[in-house]
Image (tube, grey):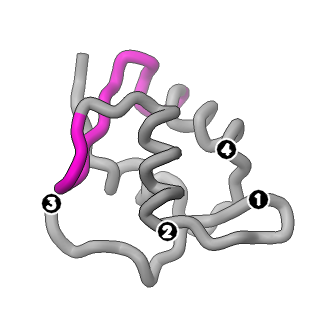
Amino acid sequence: MKKLHAHEVLNMMGTKTYTEELLKKEILENFGEDTLFYTCSAEDMNADELIAFLKQKGKFKPQEEGFAFDETKRCNHH
């Protein structure tokens, strides 16, 4: 099982628009189903938990067809 920082997912997202289902699908395809994610304030999150966490932290900005990563919400620490 590997562990990655949530920044890896935010970097993957770039400026693309997602739905929660599409984001989960791309996380699993890119990082694998057994990957857990961590941040400075949470750890051992699966894809569903990470998406909920990022949403709750305001990292997504609404788009017409879903949401995108809000670059202004990027933290600069690891």
Q: Earlier in the sequence, mark 2 or mark 4?
A: 4
Q: Where residue 34 appears, x then y in whole percent?
A: 36, 17
In front: label 3 or label 4: 4
Q: Residues within 10 Å of mark 2 (few under 14, many from 20)?
A: few
- Looking at the image, residue 17 sits to the left or right of residue 47; the answer is right
Vertical position of residue 62 compared to residue 34: above or below: below
Residue 78 placement: quadrant: bottom left
23 above or below 12?
A: above
**Residue at (61%, 43%) from the top-left corner?**
23
Residue 78's disc number: 3
Q: Counting residues from the N terminus, which is met first, the one under dot 2 or under dot 1?
A: 2
Q: CA distance from mark 2 to mark 1?
A: 14 Å
Q: For mark 1, what is the residue? A: 66
Which class describes the residues within 10 Å of circle 4: few (<14), some (14-19), or many (20+)? few
Residue extent of the magenta highlight: 29-43
Residue 6 x/y as whole percent: 33, 49
Q: The disc labelled 4 sits on which kind of residue?
A: Glu
Q: Nearer the viewer, residue 63 or 49?
A: 49
In primary-sequence order, the first of circles 1 and 4 is: 4
Task: Locate residue 26 relative to residue 41 in the image: left or right.
Answer: right
Q: Is residue 60 magenta?
A: no
Q: Amino acid at mark 2?
A: Gly
Residue hosting label 4: 20
In the rendered image, residue 40 lying in the magenta stretch gets the answer yes
Q: Amino acid at mark 1?
A: Gly
Indicate the secondary structure of the residue bearing disc 1. strand
Q: Using residue 20 as the reference point, say whether residue 77 is left or right of it.
A: left
On the image, numbered disc 2 is attached to which residue?
Answer: 58
Task: Name the quadrant containing residue 10.
Answer: bottom left
